[in-house]
Amino acid sequence: FKTDVKVGGSGLEPPPFAFAFDIDGVLLHVAKPIPGAAEVLRFLNDYNIPFILLTNGGGKHERDRVRDLSEKLGVQLSTDNFVQSHTPFQELLEGPDSLRDKTVLVTGSDYEKCRSIFKEYGFQNVVTPADIFAADPTIFPFQSASSYPHPSQPLPKPLYNKPTLDRASLPSHLKIDAIFVLNDPRDWALDTQIITDLLLSHAGYLGTYSPLNGKGNGDNGGGWQQDGQPRLYFSNADLLWSAGYHLPRLGQGAFQAALAGLWRRITGGAAELRRTSIGKPFAETYRFAERVLAAHRREVLRAMGHHVLHYQHHHQHRQDPPADLAPDGGSGGGGDKGGEAALRRVYMIGDNPESDVAGANGYASPEGTEWVPVLVRTGVWSEARGGKLEGRFEPRTVADDVTAAVRWALRREG
Ligand code: G3P
Ligand code: MG
């Protein structure tokens, strides 16, 4: 990747900008690097221009996905500059509503991989649809028990199996407190059966049924009441994504839309599917990504001998650099070698107007950092197929590919 643009002057002052790269449709088509992608990342590494990878993908632990990406792209990456769809779910382990010791159901492309991701995150009780099927194959009459790999851990408690609610025996049965979709489910049929069972249950006890407050069952318009059901979390709302096929493929957002349609039918149109969705374009994910990028950038610049002051925006003051690192010998509060080193702009290079462009346009950074969306033609969007690039879907520019996108940004930064 050779650029005709001077990069960051003589490199003495830290660049006030950084990059966030989407993966699918920008850097890779599934496992195949997109031409130029590896060279661009190596170039930015060589010139110490900070970047993160910000993907709606998932299904592997960050450490494993980063190792794969480093190999595929031939560039040194780390979990310090990598955010994938479900990375922010780790924040649910903390705080007053911590799910650490609760029981959660996870699903995605590989049940055991999803379980191991959440166990490594720190969730103590992680259940998969295959565990439930193994415990009672009659819950899903379309498959033989042999059709699922035997789960690595049997369920800790039995499934409730009485037609009417027996409150006295409830505590001895399995209760699911939250449901997580980590990446594109493979078995939509089993997953939708189990998830709808849980959303219709009494307080997350699988096998119970919440009394309808309407007349009869959901089919004839009976209402349906909330009864302490588990919260439902999706890690990614992408309806489409760019894989190896020449047309976009259905993503996790398609599974969510199918489930929402099924839910409307089951509840007789009475209830919209209540769920929390993260990933791009949602602000939580951009906020999380900005924090990861800022921390990573501080390390990159520190390695260059610059000291970036760490804003604690919620205290509205600068946190003075540790004395041993302050450039002027520890008087604290002083500027850093390279003058003001705040991060002013992040170029969000993406292929999906609905997630990469809309997210950057809609994100109001508490640090005042401007997120500048750049749309590439190597993914979901194209002039022929793509929708109008108006409003929140309007990028700052459209570039043929990631190389052209980075060159445009560097030229703009002069
Ligand atoms: O499942 C991955 C897909 O939703 C898109 O991922 O990397 O383009 O945000 P990405
Ligand atoms: Mg993409």
Image: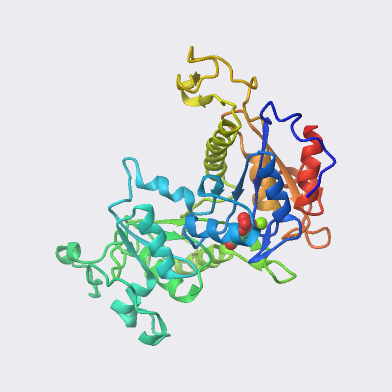
- Side of 347 where 88 appears, left or right: left
Left or right: 235 as drawn, with respect to 35: left
As drawn, 245 above or below 373: below
Most distant residue in the right direction:
4
Taking depth in this image into account, of 407 and 55 the one nearest to the observer is 407
Decide if residue 238 is in sight here: no
Q: Nearer the viewer, residue 70 or 139?
A: 70
Q: How is the image coloured?
A: rainbow
Q: Position of residue 180 (x, y in %)?
A: 43, 59
Number of labels in the image equals 0
Q: Residue furthest top?
A: 331
Residue at 78 percent across and 38 percent down: it is 410
User: Of all residues shown, which one is farthest toward the left?
Assistant: 168
Q: Is residue 172 rendered to the left or right of residue 321?
A: left
Q: Which quadrant of the figure has residue 195?
A: bottom left
Q: Is residue 179 left or right of residue 365?
A: left
- Residue 186, given in percent of the width and then of the height, sits at 51, 73
Ligand 2 located in image quadrant: bottom right
> Residue 29, located in which quarter of the rendered image?
bottom right
Percent across and percent down for residue 119 are: 35, 58
Classify 43 as above or below 15.
below
Q: Which quadrant is home to the C terminus?
A: top right
* Along the line of sight, the residue nearer the viewer: 118 or 208: 118
Residue 188 visible? The answer is: yes
Residue at the image point whose x is 79% and y is 62% from the top: 385
Q: Position of residue 400 (x, y in %)?
A: 82, 54
Pick whichever, 169 or 365, lies toward us. Answer: 365
Above or below, comparing residue 21 to residue 131 in the picture: above
